[in-house]
Amino acid sequence: MHTIRESADRRSPIASAAKPGITLAAVAVVQFMVSLDLSVVNVGLPQIGAGLGFSAVGLTWVIHAYALTFGGLLLLGGKAADRYGRKRVLLLGLGLFGLASLLGGLAQEPAHLVAARAAQGVGAAALAPAALALLTAAFPSGKARIRAFGVWSATNAAGGALGVLIGGLLTEYAGWRWVMFVNVPMAAGALALAWRGVAAGPPPARGGRPDVLGAVLATAGMTLLVFGIVRIDQDSWTSPATLLAAAVLLAAFVHVERTTTREPLIRLGLFANRSVAGANGFNLLTGAAMASSFYFMSLYLQHVLGIGPARAGLMFMPFAFAVIVGSVLAVKLGYRLAPRTLLVGGGLVTATGFTWFGLISSDGAFATDVLGPSVVAGIGFGLCLGPLVSIATAGVADHETGTASGLLNSSRQIGASLGLAVLGTLASNRTGQTVTPQTLNDGYALGLSLGAALLLAAALLALTVLRGAGSPSRADQADDRDLLAVRD
């Protein structure tokens, strides 16, 4: 046993100093909080608008301010985690996120809430990649890694799915301000766990001067891209200048990253890693499909079937539970199957559920039009989440896992924004000028069917690009058994 302990310590000095269980708990709370915040505000928007005096157009910035800063600064957050230390960046991000949530709940004017939401996005952009990098370092291989990413997947999905229900309940029974206040105790709890139980890790690598130009170009380009996408539904396709400016800035960023003599913000060679490229492409497509599905099904339940917001929130619960079931199933299957196999299978199962969603009718019923496809799509999506994150950081150097994690989060945000804009526009065109339950149903059905096509494309991408992402090796599983024996 003494020999095993010495071998384990030599293999992973960081893991031996860390407390993996506490790290997992802190990361789970962080991911639940970030996922929750993406959806918890939506149900309370009418009450927020009435309470603070937002205009119809101004109210959209309660959502856009968070999406723009979160999506635009994720790469910078990942780089900061690699450069300045993951635990340090995580703690700073949690502090900012919690403080911004408190100030948002106390807002007295529209500008106050929009500024608080933007600050929440900055905090989330810092803490999300740092938390995922800490999880990757704490669980480097074997069965423990599979279980850890299974827990991460479940909390990620539960936060997003429960956000609609929690937002509705808080708004109705406690007031809209609590959709902001709810983040404060979660941020405080995660901060306490991370402060006491997460290892600081090795000193961060100190290279040359920071790539300030690259950071500015990347952040500005991504922010303009997300801004152009989220404004498409209001400006139709008449805002090419914004998208052109984003393209120019991002092209300039690529040029700078290829030619800079300093340490780049993101090493473009990362995309030569098939796991990184394939996982982010898969994430982009599934993010577009899943974000659109929440939007279309929420509108279908309320505008077509005439169901109130509270009951509509409850009807999202089968999907949330199904995602958890799929995540647990992915853990069990992950001991024997390659991550790529789970991604392909999960993508196909989710596409099947979306195809079923596409059959919704204006006189539909919960059991046939909502419950059935929710269970199928939820299980399939749960199968994808853990393996996706594991693949996205596979083969990445330890000092770049924060950057890889930020890239994965960024691809999901961009995919979600792009999917909502494009599929929403196509669905609106199908609905036409005459708005009836039947025409609305036709538009939503088209959007959900197109989501199924995106998921099929994601499965095909995983099948063709992720050929090198194999199943857990026997050596990894043997190492994991040794580490478990040390803990026992």
Image: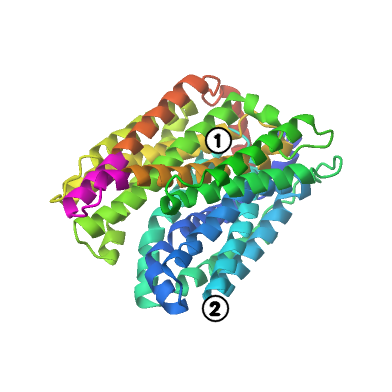
Pick whichever, 373 or 200, lies toward us.
373
Discs 2/1, front? 2
Q: Which residues are magenta?
A: 427-448
Question: In this image, 134 relative to 326: left or right?
Answer: right
Closer to the camera, 153 or 35? 35
On whether residue 441 falls in the magenta region, the answer is yes
One can see residue 17 in this view: no
Q: Which residue is mark 2?
A: 106
Tally of marks: 2
Q: Amino acid at mark 1?
A: Ser
Upstream in sequence: badge 2 or badge 1: 2
Q: Position of residue 294 (x, y in %)?
A: 35, 50
In which quarter of the view is residue 402 placed? top right
Near mark 2 (Cα within 10 A), the count class, few <14, some 14-19 or many ≥20, is some
Residue 263 drawn at (x, y percent): 80, 37
Residue labelled with disc 1: 390
Q: How is the image coloured?
A: rainbow
Q: Position of residue 457 (x, y in %)?
A: 40, 28
Query: In the structure shown, which secondary structural element does the residue marked by tag 1 occupy?
Result: helix
| Viewport quadrant of the C terminus | top right
**Pointer 1: residues within 10 angstroms few (<14), some, or many (20+)?**
many
**Is residue 476 in sight in this rendering?**
yes
Q: Residue at x 53, y 54 (%)?
A: 67
Q: Are marks 2 and 1 in contact (CB under 8 Å)?
A: no
Residue type for callout 2: Leu
| Disc marking residue 32 | none
Q: Per the image, is 186 magenta?
A: no
